Image: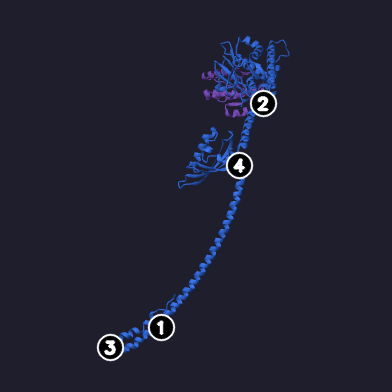
Amino acid sequence: MINPPRHLFYLSPLPIKSQTKTVIPVEIRDRRKQQKIFSLGPVLLANFAVSGIYFLSVLAALIAIVALIKKIRQYQKELDLKSAALADQTNYREQAEALAEANRVLFDVAVEGVGLGVFTWIVATKEISYNQQWAAMMGYKLWEVEPNSKAWLDHIHPQETRTVKAAIIYFLRSGKDHYQFEHRVKTKTGEWKWIMAYLKVQERDSNGKALKVTGVHLDIDDMKHKQLELQKITRELMHSNTELQKFAYITSHNLRAPAVNLLSLAELYNYTKPDDEFNVEVVRKIHKSSLQLNETLNDLIEIVSQKPGHVEPTQNLNLAQETHNVLNSIDYLIKKEKAQVNLSFDHVPEINYSRKILHSVLLNLVSNAIKYKAPDRNPIVNIRSYRVGGNNFLDVTDNGQGIDLKKNKNKLFGLYQRFSRKTDGKGLGLFIIKSQIEAMNGTISVDSNVNLGTTFTIEFNKFERN
Amino acid sequence: MIELFLVDDDDINNFLFSHLLKKSEANASLQSFTNPLEALQAIKARIADQNAIDLLLLDINMPLLSGWEVLEELRADTESLLKNTRIYMLSSSVHATDMEQASIYPEVSGFISKPISLDQLSGIFAEIENKVAKPG
């Protein structure tokens, strides 16, 4: 590798050779002789220098070799380190792989155990690959499921289709990482099932637009039904609680009023002069107050005896016959007010219902219609039965004074609400029949125009068919 | 002379009140109503004629219009004019909900649980006399 410097062998003879061939004047020759003496010095010196250079070169070479060896060692070290690191990496990778495998097992168990529908959705192409559990949740085999968004979106309940689609569009545009909502899906057997959908963006393009979305569908049907049922029960409880509060308020008021009047009237009685004419008026008012107290107590008994969950026995009832029985019991009122009651039961002559409740309903509605008559005309009450959409209805229409529904609709069926005076109505009737009708799964509604009249419509067994 | 309006659908209560008033020997003129709508008309008419009402006794629980609704109607029409009127709400039983309602109606001076006693009535009359006397 290291050649000895060749010029060391050629340097010395060259100047001598050139001297023999050249004619040189004496004095110059002499000078040359001197010069010769002097010229030998540089040659030797050069030789020395050459040797020095040679030595230095060798030294440099040695140093270079040493440096090289050092470098090689360094490389070796680095290589050792790198290979050690590589070994570490391999180890790490193995560990990571083991962890991934463990996670995969956990994931599979979770997915299987919970029946988790998992899917990956390529947004642009609407391709969705679903897992087996997703298909199973929907009642299908995986091969029956089209691998696109239709398999999901086309099975959403019509009531939720719009909101779900809007939610998805919102999610994709919002830049949110994940989103969650609930809706019903139609399974293969045609049943509706509540699911919870969780979506997460997996990939975005450089503009942040979602390219790939991963989603989870969880069957929450049981939970959701329980939740809805609880909400319903809570609403009902709150409603009946409010009713009870009103009841306590009104009854305490209506019981106390006649009781207090009785006390005060008794104090007004002139005991020292029993034949005082004033006493006659006082006693008449005492009588009136005791009647009021008695009626309020009877109403209370009626309400309290309505046990929740108690089902009234039903039977086939001839509407004309039952109505005649009721009208006979209020004959005095009909005659006194010169009322005319027209019956039309041709469309539905018979219903299967509780006789007790039918009587109570007819009695209340007909006597109300007569009591709240218009001052300038005799009362006319039309009662008719009819059938719409498989349900039986009964209308009681009057030509009475009417009710301002704008002001009173919410209070109409409430406890002790009266909308007219000059009558002895205590406002309990509509409350009682409403709760009776509802206990029989029916509804009662009202339509009224002030000074024209009122129609009460009863829909029997409305909820029984569902 | 104290101008007094009583609005209560319970005619027996009104009968009892008129006797109590007689007994109190106060210098008062009473107009009582069992129909809140008629009462509302009369009150509005009276105020429109620039005639004061010194005391208004309003039953809470009435058909057609509750005592609160009567107040609401009066407010809408004659809020400023009612400032000179003392208003007491009547009820055969005073409930917490009624007390809460009262906080919405600062024009209400108080509640009276029926029947009103002679002492209560005299007390209210005394208040009215004093108030009238002061600005005199």
Tag of residue A48: 1
Q: Residues within 10 Å of mark 2 (few under 14, many from 20)?
A: few
Label 4 lies in what chain?
A
**Is the residue under label 3 in contact with that under label 4 (CB below 8 Å)?**
no
Image disc number at residue A115: 4
Question: Distance from label 2 to label 4 (Cα)?
Answer: 51 Å
Q: Earlier in the sequence, mark 2 or mark 3?
A: 3
Tell me where residue A241 appears, x and y as whole percent.
65, 29
Q: What's the residue type where badge 4 is placed?
A: Gly
Residue located beneath label 2 in the image: A248
Residue A258: image location, x then y, percent: 68, 19
Nearest to the eye among marks 1 and 2: give it. 1
Chain depicted in purple: B
Residue at mark 1: chain: A
Q: Give the secondary structure at mark 4.
A: loop
Q: Colour of chain A?
A: blue
Judging from the image, the colouring scheme is by chain
Tell me where residue A396 sits by quadrant. Answer: top right
